[in-house]
Image: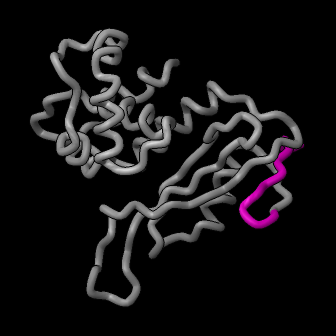
């Protein structure tokens, strides 16, 4: 299954979308892979490549989404649905070799912050496993900091990938489980 077909499976919570969610998610993935960080950088990527993207994607639009459309769509994305779809696609597409080195990292999602006025705030983080040889994220999972930890999330990801690990700070030397 292609990445586009997978992204089409992510549930869209918007009531009157101007663009399909898969288009926005694909643009974010491509811009991020090109080193863009933040909504403005993603918009700059889209503007720079708009003519080619419209032609290649064969979408019936005269222009692609702007900064505010991308931002509004991403704020409403269901992280659990997105991570499930991504993991399924990655497991079908990427094959990890024995003794592969994988990096692990967690990033907090700023727009998910709740309980601003409490000492212990609630937010969503996305924990990812990256194949260092391939330069690809092979699995990711969202977690709420009030109900889980990054360590528990990493253990779940390793089990899902059927990997045993020798942990070093933020690096996993993975091999297939017997």
The answer to whether residue 8 is left or right of residue 165 is left
Q: Position of residue 138 (x, y in %)?
A: 64, 39
**Horizontal side, residue 174 vs residue 128: left or right:** right
Residue 135 as seen in the image, left or right of residue 111: right
Q: Quadrant of the C terminus?
A: top right
Check the image and report above or below for 26 versus 37.
Answer: above
Looking at the picture, how far across and down is residue 157, in whole percent? 65, 51
Q: Position of residue 24 (x, y in %)?
A: 30, 33
Is residue 166 visible to the viewer in this orientation of the structure?
yes
Which residue lies most toward the bottom here? 119
Q: Residue at x 64, y 37 (%)?
A: 136
Q: Which secondary structure is most common in the magenta stretch?
A: strand
Q: How is the image coloured?
A: one colour
Where residue 8 sits, quadrant-wise, is top left
Is residue 84 in sight in this rendering? no
Q: Nearer the viewer, residue 137 or 89?
A: 137
Magenta stretch in the rendered image: 168-178
Does the magenta segment cover residue 169? yes
| Residue at x 34%, y 23% (from the top left corner) | 49
Where residue 22 sits, quadrant-wise, is: top left
Q: Choose top left, top right, bottom left or bottom right for residue 65.
A: top left
Count numbered badges in the picture: 0
In this rendering, position of residue 4 left or right of residue 73: right
Return the x and y of residue 25 as percentages of the image width and height: 36, 35
Q: Which residue is depicted at the point 16% across and 16% down?
A: 62
Residue name at image x 34 percent, y 40 percent: 42
The correct choice, above or below, for 152 with respect to 62 in the image is: below
Q: Is residue 150 above or below residue 31?
A: below
Q: Is residue 33 magenta?
A: no
């Amino acid at each position: 299954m292609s990445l586009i077909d997978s992204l089409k499976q992510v549930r869209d919570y918007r009531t009157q979308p101007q663009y399909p969610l898969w288009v926005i998610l694909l643009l974010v993935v491509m811009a991020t892979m090109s080193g863009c960080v933040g909504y403005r950088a993603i918009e700059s990527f889209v503007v720079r490549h708009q003519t080619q993207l419209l032609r290649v994607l064969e979408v019936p639009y005269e222009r692609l989404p702007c900064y505010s459309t991308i931002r509004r769509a991403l704020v409403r994305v269901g992280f659990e649905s997105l991570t499930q779809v991504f993991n399924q696609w990655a497991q079908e597409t990427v094959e990890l070799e024995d003794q592969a080195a994988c990096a692990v990292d967690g990033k907090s999602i700023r727009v998910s912050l709740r309980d601003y006025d409490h000492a212990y705030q609630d937010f969503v983080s996305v924990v990812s496993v990256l194949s260092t040889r391939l330069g690809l994220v092979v699995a990711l999972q969202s977690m709420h900091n009030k109900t889980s930890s990054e360590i528990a999330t990493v253990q779940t990801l390793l089990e899902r990938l059927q990997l045993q690990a020798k942990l070093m700070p933020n690096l996993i030397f993975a091999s297939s489980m017997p």
